[in-house]
Image: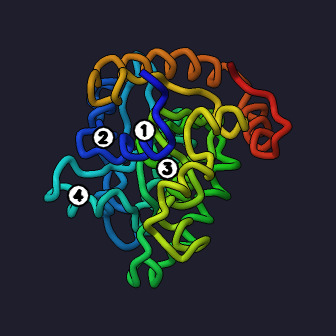
Amino acid sequence: MTNPTPWEKLKIARMVERPTALDYIEKIFHSFIEFHGDRCFGDDPCIVGGIAELGNIPVTIIAQQKGRNTKENIKRNFGMPNPEGYRKALRLMKQAEKFKRPVICFVDTPGAFCGVGAEERGQGEAIARNLLEMSNLRTPIISIVIGEGGSGGALAIAVADQVWMLENSIYSILSPEGLASILWKDASRAKEAADIMKITAQDLKEFEIIDKIIEEPEGGAHNDVDKVAINIKENLKKVIGKLISMPIDETVENRYMKFRKIGKYVE
């Protein structure tokens, strides 16, 4: 089978059948306890967060959750977080820092919600605050793009020591439909935009924007969720062990230098 085109990968990433963050959490971790609320406005069902165990390592999990059907997608706002979701994520990150737990993030969003209420409650500030705090968070962070990684909505939980992508996931500054609308005033040219945007895991690995590509079965992760989950788990255990053994000052410095493009990397 020939390699899928960027547009075909995008369609795979958006499939309703594609495994969600909760699917992976259930298969990779045990003793997961979900926490709720940002202690400011409310709880955002689009951001799932809590504590769990990876083998014998306690970790904090933060994930963007899409629905598995229309009813769930409405509840989860189609994977588009509100500001309270990002503030909940930050609350859990700071808690992880306090108790020295590594943070594992699952990224899967078309972008942050851009509704009037979200803007009134400070969507831009919430995302910017996460970028600032994650860059200096004194505990290891790994972020995995499992579906769509859209714009600042994805980056708000992806300033990490290691950024991975599933083979058929995408990561971009905006959707191909958005780029086509801006560039050509024609959203119907989204397929053409996808081909020039360099949104695939393979492109981003070549540019050193991400650190690892997690293989998927032919046709997408939904064809063998267990296999993909095992692959993620094995990689997590290997890399987290190395990260937690490093002095935290070195970890934070490497994270900063990584995003400055002159850093050292954990293999």
Q: Label 2 amino acid?
A: Thr
Q: Which residue is under mark 2?
A: 20
Q: Residue 28's quadrant in the figure?
A: top left
Numbered disc 3: secondary structure: strand
Numbered disc 1: secondary structure: strand
Whichever of callouts 1 and 2 sits on the residue coming sooner in the sequence is 2
Crowd band around label 2 with a 10 angstrom C-alpha radius: few (<14), some (14–19), many (20+)? many
Q: Is residue 100 visible?
A: no
Crowd band around label 4 with a 10 angstrom C-alpha radius: few (<14), some (14–19), many (20+)? some
Asked if labels 2 and 1 touch by Cβ distance under 8 angstroms, the answer is yes
Whichever of callouts 3 and 4 sits on the residue coming sooner in the sequence is 4
Q: Label 4 amino acid?
A: Asn
Quadrant housing the C terminus: top right
Q: Nearer the viewer, residue 134 or 219?
A: 219
Q: Which residue is under mark 3?
A: 149
Whichever of callouts 3 and 2 sits on the residue coming sooner in the sequence is 2
The tag on residue 185 is none
* Above-or-below relation of 144 to 87: above
Query: Separation of disc 4 and disc 1 at Cα?
Result: 17 Å
Q: Residue 213's quadrant in the figure?
A: top right
Numbered disc 4: secondary structure: helix
Crowd band around label 1 with a 10 angstrom C-alpha radius: few (<14), some (14–19), many (20+)? many
